[in-house]
Amino acid sequence: MQGVAWPSTCKFSRSHRQHLISTKWDQMQRQLHAARLARPIPATARADTVPVWETLVIVNSLPEGSQGPEEQQELLDTLWSLQYRTPGACCASAGPVVKSASRDSNAAARAAVYYRFSSQVQAERFVAGPVFAEAKARLLGTGNVSLALWKVLVPNDMEALFKRGPAFEAGVDLVLVMQPASPQQPPAMDAIVELMGRLQRTALAANSLQVSCGVDVMSLDPRYMWMARFPQEDCAQRFLRSPAVAELATGMDVGTAGSATSEPSRSGALALTSLALIEIGAVKQSRQSL
């Protein structure tokens, strides 16, 4: 993921807004959630969805002299706890990156902090506000970070919405970052929807607990975020070995069987540009119910 500036206001291109309000995109997510709800669920769950805004902070590097485990743990603990100082935060998680890959050889993700907000306005206020800015300046200084923000529909169920319960206390989050395979020829929306649906079905087969995907509104160029929670790292690794991921990762070394050349394939709608596998449960407080 590329480092981005920290603006006082967030501006979004017209094409991004068109993607965000796409009926096909929302319909695809509802269909996939309906498929998931075919599994046994709590009696209190309802088969409808609500929109939330996912916010992901990736720490790519730390300032010189602050690379130790104690400093990294303080960083994760502090950034995770910001949810209690921020209106509209539904939940948060934080942890070290246990595996990463990128077409940019200079990128090396080290840690990640994730927040879920109930509205876009609250998410934007958080990333542009003084609470996050102060924590970033104090703990990271000149360290390089990346920010992503996207909308997703989740089941209107307390455990799913707030990521509560034993199933969410540990495991790994897998983040995929994708961009158009051919910048000169933007992919059709139908092709993107089909690809996202295939990834989510593959993740379900690998026992994922929850999947979210959307357009990163913080990126100046078209960028698509995909994130899934898996109960164990083995499940995430099984997903990464799937044909659906192999097609996206053509020309990229993700530690699976396939190519490791520098150029992505131009045959598909999107190409994988980076991935990060994040350990969940490293922050002690995150094991408690919010």
Image (spheres, helix red, strand yellow):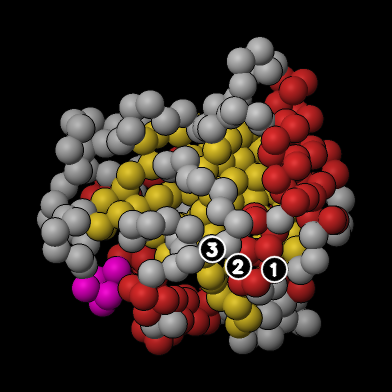
Instruction: Count how many numbered circles sit on residues in the image.
Output: 3
Q: Which mark is residue 10?
A: 3
**Badge 1: residue crowd in 10 Å (few <14, some 14–19, many ≥20):** some
Residue closer to the observer: 136 or 44: 136
- Residue in view at x 21 percent, y 67 percent: 187
Q: Position of residue 241 (x, y in %)?
A: 35, 43
Report if the CB atoms under discs 2 and 1 are less than 8 Å apart: yes
Q: How far apart are the two marked residues, 3 and 1, measured between alpha carbons?
A: 12 Å
Q: Earlier in the sequence, mark 2 or mark 1?
A: 2
Q: How far apart are the two marked residues, 2 and 1, measured between alpha carbons?
A: 9 Å
- Residue in view at x 33 percent, y 27 percent: 105
Write down the quadrant of residue 208 in the picture: bottom right
In the image: residue 60, left or right of residue 221: right
Q: Earlier in the sequence, mark 3 or mark 1?
A: 3
Q: Magenta segment, which residues?
A: 188-192
Determine which residue is flagged by label 1.
Answer: 122
